[in-house]
């Protein structure tokens, strides 16, 4: 029996894995124990990806503080993913690349070539040779890297180190940009540190009120609902309640029924107005915690002035939430706050409010509300963001972000550069500067010019970073009354590589063709690359487009660590051997580094890429020492020993010395640690590894220059792509319980696929009747960026002015073909959650995905427009 955690979301539910009792047992999910590894085929061809194999695993829920013995359907069936029928078990390469003629051909010429098996030496030599040639001809910026929020801490760390020391490219970012970047930017700016929940999840249970904005956790992480029981009970007692803000009557919104709480159903894209209205009421009715504000906060007066114009009746005209409901919720929150003798209140945000062109500002408004009520940094109350991806927290701490070095250090901080360069054995000067955030990075790919994003970033040029450096943070201080649109981007876009288009891309743990906004334009960018290398364990849509596919180990086949949504560092353990020739990314990066050399090293061979995850973690811990996310007091052995003793686990920061505990009340860490000399560094002090970790942050102050939280005035700008004639409906996107992210994993689990086999469009019956789209009929949503088709589902869970579509599918049902790639100016977060669309029925007999113009729209009030031609834009040379 192997104790580990679920491979999917950030709740990281505890589970145990055991071998099946006999071939065919298949574990809890009934997965066949022996399955063919035949591929689905690349671009019409069927790659031979290896022999049949057997790998049955039984999943048993395990008691762990986040899930308390519960699992959702995804967790129960998670072992099936390992035995996916099309698991990739050998390296694959486009056939022509194995010939010298093919290697000279352009990538576009190779896309119709079949992917064929090849040896590791062959593909690694080929990839290293092409990368070296591109770097020699076009410079280091010609190679880009894209990581993922599902990678272990060790892999994320190694990927960032590889990009900065071997490739020496600034062009690295990851799909966490699509997930947590707005909350990260806002919390860094306001509180001085970003840990999704700066308190244990279980703390929610003791509160009278939980205000949940834009999170449908009843579907995305069902076991977490247990932690809302206290607030729901308080609702029934009349002393509090669960408050859910969501334009849909989601499964989570339904938890407020029967007196358990309140559901506010705003117009999509107006959550900010709800928050401004709530804060107006708190101030107008004298409910603020004045003592807390005086002692622990700066910027309050500016914020108070800014919300004076958002009286509830005015807010109602914009967000549609009745003024009396806003007053009721503001009073509920205040009564639950410690200042008024309540048991506590929490304000939580999720992707629904964060994936917005004003996401950072909206989270800032949520933090302003929490600070005004005196909730943050108090036991039993607080503000937090509900992280989504499995390692969405750890993945953003250790260097795969464009602006970041390990330990949540800023890459443009000279002291941080020197420290980390020492750990890595390179010179600080050899490290590149900040790169581009994900959307801008993807649009910059390829030698040919990119199509322009669907809409510009708010506030002008695209953002580059979501973690303010100390200087930038100071400039963003609230005294200036910075509004959301005027807030400065904290680093210049593009960094050193802004003028060179990446011609090669290495993708790890991301399925961009399905998960990126304005996905068709991203697909075109990927097709224009000279080399696309995808490391994956199944042939995702992105892998099937690659020139080279590297088979990797996954979840129960690997050792490592993850960091949960509450900042708890946990162990992932191996329960099965790797299939076929699959290898860990740690090994792949080490092999590529060996072939490419490390041009910035201070001594030959100084830059090492260990392949043992425990050794990588030890190095990560050293590199993080003194940073905001300080793991230096941890090791695999310490984590294992704590778990064996049923300990509480460790929440970062966990510094190696107790005297350097956690983010201090200064902009820079109080103790950066002695500059480390890398792998040969002296061992940690004798009193190391005794720090207990930091379950609750900010109790004694905020890690800001003056130790106070910063309130920052923000205002409402509305969606970047708002409704208008010709695009009269809001499109809202989201998830379903049975599928995870792009669906690359869960579509391969028969039980889940059977339950939700295809995409759908939720529309209100009134709308369906008006436009002639009956329940169960096919409908088409169209924007300037493209169109998407799916089956209509009539439901009064959506507003009549809104349609909803889940985003887990590719092809004509891939909703990210129409979502906007407008981004938040500070975080770089794309506005996935809302855009304007028109809808029309698709008559019977019309083939799916038929080009616009061939679909009769006679019964539609909103006839289909032809797609507008993309605007091409040349990046300055
Ligand atoms: S809630 Fe998340 S971590 Fe828990 S079983 Fe479901 S997918 Fe896995």
Image (cartoon, helix red, strand yellow):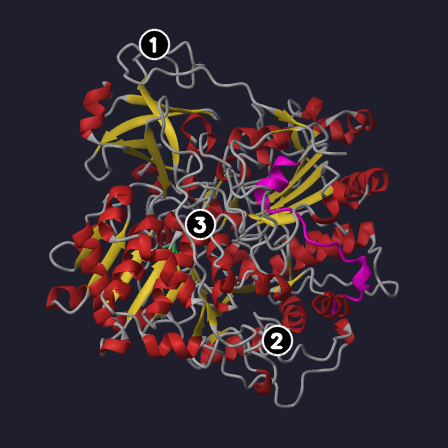
Residue bearing the label numbered 2: 669
**Displayed quadrant of residue 505:** top right
Q: Residues within 10 Å of mark 2 (few under 14, many from 20)?
A: many
Q: Position of residue 336 (x, y in %)?
A: 23, 71
Q: Give the CA separation, mark 2 to mark 3.
A: 27 Å
Kind of element beneath mark 2: loop
In the image, what residue occupies the spot 67% across and 56% down?
A: 160
Report ligand 1 position as a quadrant: bottom left
Question: Which quadrant of the rendered structure holds the N terminus?
Answer: bottom left
Q: Is residue 250 visible?
A: no
**On the rendered structure, is 349 left or right of 770?**
right
State the extent of the magenta-drawn residues as a range.
423-444
Among the two numbered marks 3 and 1 on one chain, the one whose residue lies closer to the N terminus:
3
Q: Give the CA separation, mark 2 to mark 1.
A: 63 Å
Q: Residues within 10 Å of mark 1 (few under 14, many from 20)?
A: some
Q: Is residue 524 visible?
A: yes
Q: Position of residue 589 (x, y in %)?
A: 71, 53
In the image, what residue occupies the spot 38% across and 66% down?
A: 383
Q: Nearer the viewer, residue 586 or 295?
A: 295
Kind of element beneath mark 1: loop
**Is 442 in the magenta?**
yes
Kind of element beneath mark 3: helix
In the image, what residue occupies the spot 45% across and 75% down?
A: 697
Residue bearing the label numbered 3: 359
Q: Give the CA separation, mark 3 to mark 1.
A: 38 Å
Q: Is residue 35 above or below residue 362?
A: above
Q: Residue furthest bottom?
A: 686
- Residue 856 shows which numbered tag? 1
Among the two numbered marks 2 and 3 on one chain, the one whose residue lies closer to the N terminus:
3
Q: Position of residue 149 (x, y in %)?
A: 53, 53
């Amino acid at each position: 029996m192997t104790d580990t955690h679920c491979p999917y979301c950030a709740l990281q539910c505890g589970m145990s894995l055991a071998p099946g009792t006999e071939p065919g047992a298949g574990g809890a999910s009934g997965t066949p124990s022996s399955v063919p590894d035949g591929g689905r085929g690349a671009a019409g061809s069927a790659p031979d990806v290896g022999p049949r194999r057997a790998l049955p695993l039984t999943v048993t829920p395990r008691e762990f503080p986040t899930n308390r013995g519960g699992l959702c359907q995804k967790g129960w069936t998670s072992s099936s993913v390992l035995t996916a029928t099309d698991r990739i078990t050998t390296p694959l390469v486009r056939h022509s690349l194995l010939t010298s003629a093919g290697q000279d051909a352009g990538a576009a010429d190779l896309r119709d070539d079949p992917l064929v098996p090849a040896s590791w030496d062959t593909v690694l030599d080929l990839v290293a040779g092409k990368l070296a040639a591109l770097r020699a001809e076009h410079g280091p910026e010609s190679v880009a890297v894209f990581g993922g929020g599902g990678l272990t801490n060790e892999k994320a760390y190694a990927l960032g180190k590889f990009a900065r020391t071997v490739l020496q490219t600034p062009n690295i970012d990851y799909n966490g940009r699509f997930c947590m970047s707005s909350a990260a930017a806002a919390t860094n700016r306001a509180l001085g540190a970003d840990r999704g929940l700066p308190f244990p999840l279980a703390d929610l249970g003791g509160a009278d009120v939980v205000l949940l904005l834009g999170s449908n956790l009843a579907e995305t992480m069902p076991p977490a609902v247990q932690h809302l029981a206290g607030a729901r009970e308080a609702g029934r007692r009349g002393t509090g309640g669960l408050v859910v803000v969501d334009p849909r009557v989601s499964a989570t919104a339904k938890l407020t029924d029967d007196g358990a709480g309140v559901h506010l159903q705003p117009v999509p894209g107006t959550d900010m107005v709800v928050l401004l209205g709530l804060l107006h009421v708190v101030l107008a009715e004298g409910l603020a915690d004045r003592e807390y504000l005086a002692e622990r906060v700066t910027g309050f007066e500016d914020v108070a002035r800014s919300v004076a114009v958002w009286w509830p009746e005015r807010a109602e005209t914009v967000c549609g939430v009745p003024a009396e409901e806003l007053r009721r919720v503001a009073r509920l929150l205040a009564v639950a706050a410690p200042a008024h003798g309540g048991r506590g209140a929490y304000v939580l945000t999720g992707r629904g409010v964060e994936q917005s062109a004003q996401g950072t500002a909206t989270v800032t408004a949520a933090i302003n509300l929490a600070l005004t009520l005196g909730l943050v940094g108090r036991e039993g109350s607080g503000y937090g963001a509900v992280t989504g991806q499995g390692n969405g927290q750890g993945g953003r701490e250790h260097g795969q972000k464009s602006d970041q070095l390990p330990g949540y250090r800023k890459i443009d901080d000279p002291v941080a550069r020197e420290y980390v360069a020492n750990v890595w054995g390179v010179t600080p000067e050899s490290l590149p500067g900040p790169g581009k955030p994900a959307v801008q990075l993807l649009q910059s790919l390829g030698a040919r010019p990119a199509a322009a994003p669907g809409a510009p970033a708010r506030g002008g040029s695209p953002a580059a970073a979501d973690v303010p450096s100390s200087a930038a943070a100071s400039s963003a201080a609230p005294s200036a009354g910075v509004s959301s649109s005027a807030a400065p981007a904290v680093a210049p876009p593009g960094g050193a590589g802004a003028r060179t288009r990446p011609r090669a891309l290495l993708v790890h743990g991301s399925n961009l063709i399905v998960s990126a906004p304005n996905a068709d334009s991203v697909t075109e960018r990927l097709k224009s690359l000279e080399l696309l290398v995808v490391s994956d364990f199944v042939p995702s849509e992105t892998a099937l487009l690659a020139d080279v596919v590297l088979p990797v180990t996954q979840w129960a086949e690997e050792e490592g660590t993850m960091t949960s949504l509450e900042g708890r560092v946990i162990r992932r353990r191996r329960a099965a051997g790797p299939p076929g020739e699959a290898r860990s990314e740690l090994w792949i990066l080490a092999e590529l580094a060996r072939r490419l050399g490390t041009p910035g090293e201070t001594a030959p061979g100084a830059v090492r890429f260990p392949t043992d995850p425990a050794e990588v973690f030890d190095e990560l811990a050293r590199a993080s020492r003194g940073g905001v996310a300080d793991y230096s007091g941890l090791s695999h052995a310490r984590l294992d020993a704590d778990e064996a003793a049923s300990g509480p686990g460790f929440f970062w920061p966990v510094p190696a010395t107790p005297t350097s505990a956690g983010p201090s009340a200064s902009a820079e860490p109080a103790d950066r640690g002695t500059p480390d000399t890398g792998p040969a560094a002296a061992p940690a002090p004798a009193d190391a590894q005794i720090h207990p970790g930091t379950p609750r942050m900010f109790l004694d102050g905020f890690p800001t220059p003056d130790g106070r939280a910063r309130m920052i005035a923000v205002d409402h700008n509305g969606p970047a792509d708002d409704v208008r004639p010709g695009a009269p409906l809001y499109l809202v996107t989201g998830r379903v319980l049975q599928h995870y992210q792009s669906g690359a994993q869960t579509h391969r689990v028969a039980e889940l696929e059977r339950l939700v086999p295809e995409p759908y469009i939720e529309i209100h019956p009134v709308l369906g009747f008006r436009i002639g789209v009956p329940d169960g009929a096919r409908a088409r949503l169209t924007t300037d960026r493209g169109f998407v088709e799916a089956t209509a589902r009539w439901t009064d869970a959506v507003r009549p002015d809104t349609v909803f579509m889940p985003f887990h599918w590719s092809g004509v049902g891939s909703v990210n073909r129409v979502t906007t790639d407008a981004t938040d100016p500070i975080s770089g977060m794309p506005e996935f959650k809302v855009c304007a669309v028109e809808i029309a029925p698709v008559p019977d007999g019309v083939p799916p995905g038929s080009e616009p113009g061939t679909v009769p729209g006679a019964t539609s009030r909103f006839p289909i427009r032809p797609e507008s031609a993309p605007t091409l834009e040349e990046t300055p040379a």
